[in-house]
Amino acid sequence: MNLKLISALLLALLLAGEAAAAVLAAERKPARPRSQVHEIVTGELLGVEGRFAVVKDSAGNELRLAITNDTKLRGPFKAGGKVEARVATDGHVISITAVKGSR
């Protein structure tokens, strides 16, 4: 066979293999649906108990907000400081942000 023809066939097989590998990799990693914000909680950070942030909201209720590895933390945080937490429709905390100008 002609050397150019063999090179072209090998290149085509290589590209086809890479495309198939990319498709298989995409199938293995299902896209995680983005959580929609259900509620925004604003209040005073009373402290942290294990994996929970304890926040007193404007109505005086103490809320325990579960912090997971997926929760985005935007600090710095101080006890007594004001925070804003975005809670998803499924109940997990998407993010907790220290509000500037608080204590």
Image (spheres, rainbow, N blue to C red):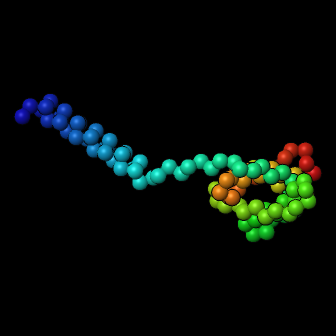
Q: Is residue 92 left or right of residue 12?
A: right
x 91%, y 48%: residue: 102
x 91%, y 59%: residue: 60
Quadrant the N terminus occupies: top left
Looking at this view, is 71 or 12 the one in front? 71
x 20%, y 39%: residue: 10
Residue lying farthest to the left in this orientation? 1
Residue lying farthest to the bottom in this orientation? 50
Looking at this view, is 77 or 67 the one in front? 67
Q: Quadrant of residue 18?
A: top left
Residue 14 placement (x, y as % from top left): 26, 41
Q: Is residue 67 left or right of residue 63?
A: left
Q: Is residue 87 left or right of residue 18?
A: right
Residue 22 placement (x, y as % from top left): 37, 45
Q: Is residue 93 visible?
A: yes
Q: Is residue 79 visible?
A: no
Q: Is residue 18 above or below residue 66?
A: above
Q: Quadrant of residue 56?
A: bottom right
Residue 62 placement (x, y as % from top left): 86, 63
x 93%, y 51%: residue: 103
Looking at this view, is 15 or 54 the one in front? 54
Looking at this view, is 66 or 1 the one in front? 66
